[in-house]
Amino acid sequence: MIALTSKDPAKLPVDALVVATAPKDGGVELVGTDWLPGELRSALVRDAGALGVTGKADEVRRVPATGLKAKVLVLVGLGTGPVTAERLRRAAGAATRELAGVGSVALALPAGDVAATVAVAEGALLGAYTYTRYRAADAARAPVASIEVVTTKAKDAAATQGVARAEVLAAAVHATRDLVNAAPNHLYPEAFTEAARAAAKGVKGVRITVLDEKALAAGGYGGLVGVGQGSPRPPRLVKVAYSPARAKAKVALVGKGITFDSGGISIKPSGSMETMKSDMAGAAAVLHTVLAAAQLGVPASVTGWLCLAENMPSGTAQRPSDVVTIRGGKTVEVLNTDAEGRLVMADGLVAATEEKPDVVIDIATLTGAQVVALGDRVGAVMGTDEVRAELVAAADRSGEQAWPMPLPDELKANLSSRVADLANVAGNRDAGMLVAGIFLKEFAGSTPWAHYDIAGPAFNERGEHDYTPKGGTGFGVRTLLAFVESRATR
Ligand code: BES
Ligand code: MN
Ligand code: ZN
């Protein structure tokens, strides 16, 4: 539950009241706390300095709430530099994340205008997340149940609307995290399909169509069939279509949904396999972006394609040197069964573009090379120049970090095969992320297209930070929703 309030923060009877700090002249300052009586303010700044509070980003410190109605006062660092929307989201998210187990929280951060108010609400909601499916109930880990954002804009219609959007968005990000965190013995292609049906139930205007393994074989989806054939849990292609009456644009989203990537016969070393339950993060982001767009009534038709398969080694698995035929007829020599994502995505891109969308975006935990290039907080965007720029701009607006990458034509030669139209891997490791992008480009045809490689940021193996938990991050949803919304209004 989240609400806006314009009440005096000093008088809010909450479990925790959050205020902002920032570094100043080797010490620390309070930001946006004019409402604090002068005495309290100077005492607080003195105490904070003595306690070693620095005001750096991600710092969350509890101090006594002397003179306030709240039970505890929480100082959250904004860090140095201008107070941008993303800085506010991160500070708010760091606070709610650290305050798991606390019942009611009010945030009195510097939220002077509508955008800042909405940013605080969004960050606070994104930070209030815990993955509980496999744990005994634990009150100390429960996400903050009640959030109040202190703002002078509490009665402003744009602020209320912005917060309503933030609630839908955060729920979509949380649901994406839940799918990514699910164990792969529980979340296999058919289970993912059922989860999609369950999530779409009651969302107006959304239709789900499923191609099972028989339909995939009959339809010539050789990529999904080939990758999925090593597993006793067969592949699926799930179409999630939101088509409002007065659509101003037609957007297709294609997501990689490898529910577990063992590498197949080209098996991964066990250390690299541990996090491969997250190899369906693209499909999860696509599913929940489509549903969020529907819940928000965005006037664009949005069709999601979830390319679901489990990549396993077995007597029925595809072999290195197998040749598969992708939907539409192009043949691929599978030289490395661990380069499976591009095979299922090729089928997905062909299926998506057959319906003649204005634009197609694919999103995938596609390459280890993406992690090497950009680390675990920044996604990589490739594609047609215009769409690539548009997707990066959408990421910037949404607060996700994304960076444009080139697709040099000459790299296509690296994918030449002696026996098929294309090989699925190059003979060397050079520019592995771009080579994967070049491969996908072959299947996007003439449709304006962008490819979002989120191998790094989809799953947080390191410590939690700002609004980002360990494990599934929900990365991609914010960018995709911002992209769809901008297409609906341009
Ligand atoms: N799912 C992996 C990519 C990945 C790696 C995602 C690390 C997240 C973290 C993908 O299917 C894969 O195995 N790619 C290979 C491709 C290679 C064989 C050309 C890779 O990147 O090593
Ligand atoms: Mn792989
Ligand atoms: Zn993979």
Image (tube, rainbow, N blue to C red):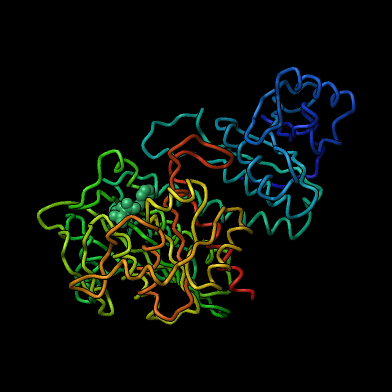
- Can you give x and y, in whole percent of width and height, for residue 67 in the image? 81, 23
Q: Is residue 114 left or right of residue 198?
A: right
- Can you give x and y, in whole percent of width and height, for residue 365 in the image? 39, 55
- Can you give x and y, in whole percent of width and height, for residue 68 in the image? 79, 26
Quadrant (top left/top right/bottom left/bottom right) for the C terminus: bottom right
Residue sticking out furthest to the right: 38
- Can you give x and y, in whole percent of width and height, for residue 184 in the image? 29, 46
Residue 91 in view, yes or no: yes
Q: In the picture shown, does residue 285 fall above or below 213?
A: above
Residue 191 in view, yes or no: no
Residue sticking out furthest to the left: 315
* Quarter of image, res 10: top right
- Near-viewer residue (65 or 356): 356
The residue under the point 58% across, 59% down is: 395
The residue under the point 24% across, 54% down is: 311
Q: In the picture shown, does residue 117 fall above or below 388?
A: above
